[in-house]
Image (tube, grey):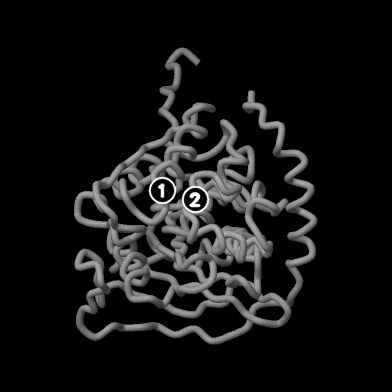
Amino acid sequence: MRAANPTRAALAALVLGALGLAAGGCAPTGDEADVEVEGVVVSSNPHLATDPTVPTTVDIPYRAVDGQPLFLDACMPPDFDPLDEPPRAAVVVVHGGSWARGSKNDIAWRAVCQWLGASGYPTFAVDYRLAPANPYPAAIDDLVAAVEWLREPEQTERFGIDPDRIGALGGSAGGNLVSLLGTRGTGPLDTGSRVAAVVELSAPVDLTGVAATDDFLPVQAAYLGCVATMECPLALAASPNTWVDDTDPPFLVAHSTDEMIPLEQARILVRTLRGVGVDTTFVQVEGRLHSIAMIDDGLKERILDFYERTLTPQVLPLVEADDEQ
C-alpha cells in the first residue's frame, strides 16, 4: 500500500493546472550535429574532462514550446551498436545553475555526460527553460517531456535504450529537478516520465524557506515567480520531499558538509525517503564543494555502483519443465 501523503492531491491539481498553461507549442524542429572534441578539455574539476572517444550528438530537438525548440545531447557508449545489441539502461543528466543559468554545453556537464556514456550508459544531457523568464513549473515540465520522448519507440530503437530502465543525475538546481522526476509521480517506474533511479548532488529539496541561507532565498523566489519564498504557494509543489511515497525509485543523495546549500536539505530528503521505505544511499562529502565539483574517483565509483545495482535488468528465474507432463 502506498504511504499516505495528504498534501499530494491538492498539490497535484495545482501543478497540473500550471503545467497545462505552460505546455503549448509545436513539434520539435532543428539540426543535429555529431561533435568530436579534439583532445581532452578539463573542467574546473580535474576529475571531469571531455572524452573524444565518446560519440556525442548535440542539439537533438525533443520538444518545442511556443515554437521554440528545446534540445538535448546524446553521449553514446563507444563501439555500441544500437541496432545489433541488447538495449541498455539510459541516464538523463540535468545541469545546475540556480534554475536561471547553465547549459548542457558547459564543459563540466558535457564531461559528466561523456563519462557516463563511456561507462556503458546511453546518456542524454538536457537543456530546459530557465527562470526568471520561465518560472516553475517550466523546467520540470521540460524534463517530463524529455523522459517521455526517450520512451517513444522511435527513440528507444534509435539509441538502443531500454525504456524500463531510465535513470537520472542532476546537481544543484538540476538535483532538485531530477528529485522531482523521481518523486512527483507515483506507481510503476517504467512508464511516462517515471525514472528508475536518481542521483542528486547538492540539491535544494525544500523550497519553503526551511534550511535555506539568506542569500539563496531570493534565488528560490525568482525561480518560483514569487516576491518571497515564504509567501509563495508553489514552494511546496516545487519541493521534491513534498511528493515522496513508497513507490519512488532508489536515490543516491550526495552533499558536502559545509557548502552553499545546507546539509540539512539533504537530510530532509533522506529522512523522508527512508521514512516510507525507499532505498536511499546517503553520501556526505567533507568540505565545501558543491554539486559536480564534489565528483572525484571515489564518488564516481559510488555512482556507478548505484546505477549497476538499480538499473540492472530484472531477470526472472528459469522454470524447468516437469518431465512427467
Q: Secondary structure at mark 2?
A: loop
Quadrant hosting residue 84? bottom left
Question: What amino acid is found at the position of numbered circle 2 in the picture?
Answer: Ala
Graded by Cα atoms within 10 Å as few (under 14), some (14 to 19) or many (20 or more), the crowding at tag 1 reads some
Give whichever of 200, 300 is nearer the camera.
Answer: 200
Q: Is residue 82 above or below residue 11?
A: below
- x, y percentage for residue 321? 44, 22
Q: Quadrant of the N terminus?
A: top right
53, 44: nearer the viewer = 44
Q: Nearer the viewer, residue 312 or 48?
A: 48
Q: Amino acid at mark 1?
A: Pro
Percent across and percent down for residue 192 are 63, 52
x, y percentage for residue 25?
74, 75
Residue projecting furthest to the front: 214
Q: Please give the name of the residue rendered at 60% of the width and 64% of the height, measured from the top-left corner.
A: 223
Left or right: 10 with respect to 266? right
Q: Residue at x 44, y 79 (%)?
A: 58
Question: Label 2, on which residue?
Answer: 212
Residue 298 x %, y %: 20, 49
Q: Which residue is mark 1?
A: 262
What is the quadrant of residue 292 in the picture? bottom left
